[in-house]
């Protein structure tokens, strides 16, 4: 989904490139490459690839997933202007992300807990501190209502 960064007069789009193991941002008007977000070392070392992406205009959030055998994934936050890595959070396998507002990021990860369920996390932006988590049966993907009142 295209986004507009504060101060820019053009929309940008961020995509994941799992073969190259990076995520990239382009100016949609000129198709100019604005920046590349390298996969974190921990994700690369675990054989993980970028998977899902969302942004709030100030930060970009990229999920990383592996084969599922390790039952873990990662969510990384990047600065939307410099594309530098800010922080990373380990989750259960196959995390997906959605932004509610400027302060909250939601993660649905369908990996398995000891109870046999996945986890939905609410984390702070941009440092990815877990504010709340709840176990749910196999959460996979998310949609926020247009007024952000329902997840």
Image (cartoon, rainbow, N blue to C red):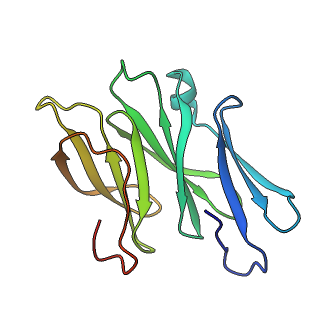
Q: Is residue 17 left or right of residue 130?
A: right
Image position, residue 143 (x, y; %):
38, 62
Q: Is residue 69 left or right of residue 135?
A: right
Front-most of residues 74 and 140: 140
Q: Residue at x 47, y 61 (%)?
A: 126
Q: Residue at x 27, y 71 (%)?
A: 150
Q: Picture quarter containing residue 67? A: top left
Q: Picture quarter containing residue 140? A: top left
Image position, residue 109 (x, y; %):
33, 42
Which quarter of the rendering shows the C terminus? bottom left
Q: How many marks?
A: 0
Q: Picture quarter containing residue 71? A: top left
Image position, residue 114 (x, y; %):
14, 28
Q: Is residue 131 left or right of residue 86?
A: left
Front-most of residues 107 and 79: 107
Q: Residue at x 36, y 30 (%)?
A: 72
In this picture, is 137 found above or below 59? above
In this picture, is 54 found above or below 15? below
Image position, residue 19 (x, y; %):
68, 28
Q: Is residue 5 left or right of residue 144?
A: right
Q: Residue at x 65, y 66 (%)?
A: 2
Which quarter of the rendering shows the N terminus? bottom right
């Amino acid at each position: 989904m295209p986004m507009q960064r504060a101060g820019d007069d053009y929309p940008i789009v961020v995509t994941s490139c799992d073969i190259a193991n990076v995520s990239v941002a382009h100016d949609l008007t000129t198709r100019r490459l604005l920046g590349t977000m390298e996969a974190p070392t921990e994700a690369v070392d675990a054989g993980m690839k970028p998977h899902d992406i969302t942004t709030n205009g100030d930060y970009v959030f990229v999920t990383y997933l592996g084969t599922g055998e390790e039952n873990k994934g990662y969510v990384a936050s990047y600065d939307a202007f410099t594309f530098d890595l800010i922080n990373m959070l380990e989750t259960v396998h196959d995390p997906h992300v959605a932004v509610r507002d400027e302060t909250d990021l939601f993660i649905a990860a369908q990996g398995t807990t000891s109870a046999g369920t996945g986890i939905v996390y609410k984390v702070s932006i941009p440092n990815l501190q877990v504010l709340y988590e709840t176990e749910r049966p196999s959460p996979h993907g998310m949609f926020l209502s247009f007024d952000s009142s329902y997840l």
